[in-house]
Amino acid sequence: MVTFPASVQVTDSHTVQAPWHLRSLQVVCFFVLLYAALPQQGLAAPASPALQLVQTLDQSPHTESIAVSTAIVRNHEIGLGPLQKIGGDWQFEDSERQSGELSRQTWQVLNGYTSLELLNELSATLDNLQEATLLYACDGRRCGHGAQWASKIFGERLLYGRQDLQRYRVYAIANAHSANDASGEGDSAGAQSARMVIYASARSEDRQYLHVDILKIQPVAGALL
């Protein structure tokens, strides 16, 4: 496993946090090296390099998985705009609905790193992948009420944090289904066969969280009902 120090040692035996630019470089190096070590071929490996990136979060020494779930969903709403209160109810300004297999995972960010650092590196990597297309992004208060994102949208109260520190990204991912996954047949265009949602939040220096939704689009019986 590739590891990087979360701090540096000084001669008087006191430990201080590494400078932000050094920590950022460590995060970049970790993603690059660990991604390169992941299997790129074979039936056991995801077909999509973008989705393989999520595995790096599980193997990182700077994250701890605290919630995981998988479910078949029908007409699941994905926000493509900020959360706004309309007619007394919190709704997306714009959104789309998709059906398929929804995988959700939340990590706590450790060792002095921030959820924003990890989100920025994930986004930078995705932005450089041909198969990934950014559909929507918002930062801070422009995303809407943080408590609603945590409880109503993601169903994870730990994600509730400072509104100015929240970040939200939605990517369309092409070729997200593995070669032996029949669900991939549901995407006739063969492109944008998944959605990846990334949300970063922070309450304090030691309570930093990153959440990722991956929805593999496929036909589901009764999806339009």
Image (cartoon, helix red, strand yellow):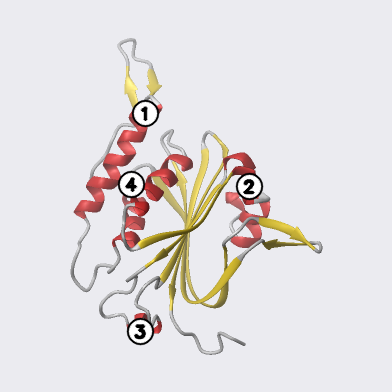
Mark 2 residue type: Arg
Query: Where is the C terminus found, in terms of image quarters?
Result: bottom right
Count residues near mark 4 (Cα–Cα under 10 Å), then give few for <14, some for 14-19, many for 20+.
Answer: some
Q: Which residue is drawn at 81% across and 64% down?
A: 87
Mark 4 residue type: Ser
The residue indicated by pointer 3 is 185
The residue indicated by pointer 1 is 21
Q: Which residue occupies the foreground of this view, 131 or 1?
A: 131
Mark 2–mark 4 distance (CA, rounded to whole Å)? 30 Å
Q: Residue 147, how many percent across, how many down?
A: 67, 51
Mark 1 residue type: His
Q: Which of marks 1 and 4 is in front?
A: 1
2 and 4 marks in contact (CB < 8 Å):
no
Secondary element type, mark 3: helix
The answer to which quarter of the image holds residue 10 is: top left
The residue indicated by pointer 4 is 60
Q: Earlier in the sequence, mark 2 or mark 4?
A: 4
1 and 2 marks in contact (CB < 8 Å):
no
Secondary element type, mark 4: loop
Q: Residue at x 41, y 35 (%)?
A: 111
Mark 1–mark 3 distance (CA, rounded to whole Å)? 44 Å
Q: Residue 32, how many percent across, how many down?
A: 25, 46
The mark total stands at 4
Q: Nearer the viewer, mark 1 or mark 2?
A: 2
Residue 142 tag number? 2
Q: Which residue occupies the foreground of this view, 101 or 197?
A: 197
Q: Earlier in the sequence, mark 1 or mark 3?
A: 1
Q: Which residue is drawn at 46% across and 84% down?
A: 219
Count residues near mark 1 (Cα–Cα under 10 Å), then give few for <14, some for 14-19, many for 20+.
Answer: few
Mark 1–mark 4 distance (CA, rounded to whole Å)? 19 Å
Q: In this view, does 202 lie above or below 96?
A: above
